[in-house]
Amino acid sequence: MKAYVIKSREDVGKPLTEAVSLVDDQPKPVPADDEVLVRVRATGLNPVDWKLVAGGNAKWTYPHVLGLDLAGDIVEVGSKVQPSWKTGMRVAGHLNLAKDGCFAEYVAVPTYELAEIPEPLGYADAAALLCGALTAYQAINRKPNLNNVDTVLVHGGAGSVGALAIQFAKLHGLRVITTVSPRKLDFVKKAAPDVVIDYTKDDVTARIAELTDGHGVDLIVDTVSGEEATKDLDRLAYNGQLVTIVGIPKIDPDFMFAHAISVAAVNLGGAHESGDPRQKKDLGEMATEVLQLAAEGEIDPMIGETIPFAGLLDGLEAIKDHRAIGKIVVTVD
């Protein structure tokens, strides 16, 4: 089968086009007793994909097939899979980065990762609602306590996490402030934030103080860095909550206690290796909820571009170079 692979450990860390090869002779995977074989129809691209090419994973065997966000059809079912999973079902899921992935025509996966794609949602939309959308779902619906929360700052509102975090926050009736660069202003408006801050020309901390009468926001979703998350501590209201997906802030314990601040981290893919069946199962449950919201028109996948399988590396380069706007989805014919 066709697949994008890293052929050897020595290729890890090389530039994308040198490290990753498109091959047409990768063996089709054979599902284990507790797995299903899925014919891949679409896959979503994420920053973690190129970061894995740069850093690798100690559990990989080579050649390693890349890819984490899957949408496709079940074509084979393992002997111990529950009967509710059948051939022909349209499914989507966020896969385990330690195992072979879905930048391929076929992939074998355990069913806890999967959700059935509801009608009328298509493969591309489903593939766009996994890594970034589930991270955003956790950042809004799992980590914070939304009691007494009125305002939220979402960094990077035009990104795959930020655009969905805005929408999930709006579903809770929150006032949403977001940060973007000038070329992404028009795109982020599709997510309907209440206030957009151009971080390239505005002082974000000063603007937050201005917008909240000096009190700060109740919740911040940081998608930027640990350094930015540290700055976010001064942007929080008393009893404020910070949820970070990329880096932990430097915290002064006295400041944290004095302002009653809470800090939480999101590591979506860590559930696979947690050893906790509840957390692993929750990946499929969250995907089911998010896909249903999209099928009902409650959220927009915010697809920026759909590209063919042959252009997958170009899509990863665009994400790596911060040229991508919205979610990039690859169709697999």
Image (cartoon, rainbow, N blue to C red):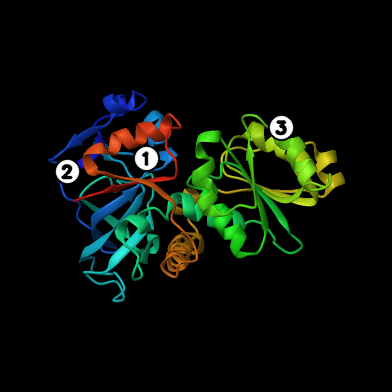
In the image, 233 versus 315, the foreground residue is 315
> Please, which residue is most extreme toward the front here?
186
Examine the rendering and report whether any part of residue 266 can be seen: yes
**In this figure, which residue is indicated by the disc labeled 1?**
59
Residue at the location (67% across, 59% down)? 174
The mark total stands at 3
Describe residue 215's horizontal placement relative to residue 54 as left or right.
right
Q: Nearer the viewer, mark 1 or mark 2?
A: 2
Residue type, mark 2 in image: Lys
**In this figure, which residue is indicated by the disc labeled 3?**
203
Residue type, mark 3 in image: Asp
Residue at the location (83% across, 40% down)? 255
- Mark 2 / mark 3, whichever is N-terminal: 2
- Mark 3 / mark 1, whichever is N-terminal: 1
Q: What element carries label 3?
A: loop
Residue 130, given in percent of the width and then of the height, sits at 42, 54
Describe residue 196's horizontal placement relative to residue 324 as left or right.
right
Residue type, mark 1 in image: Lys
Mark 1 Cα shell of 10 Å, populated few (<14), some (14-19), many (≥20): few
Residue 2: mark: 2
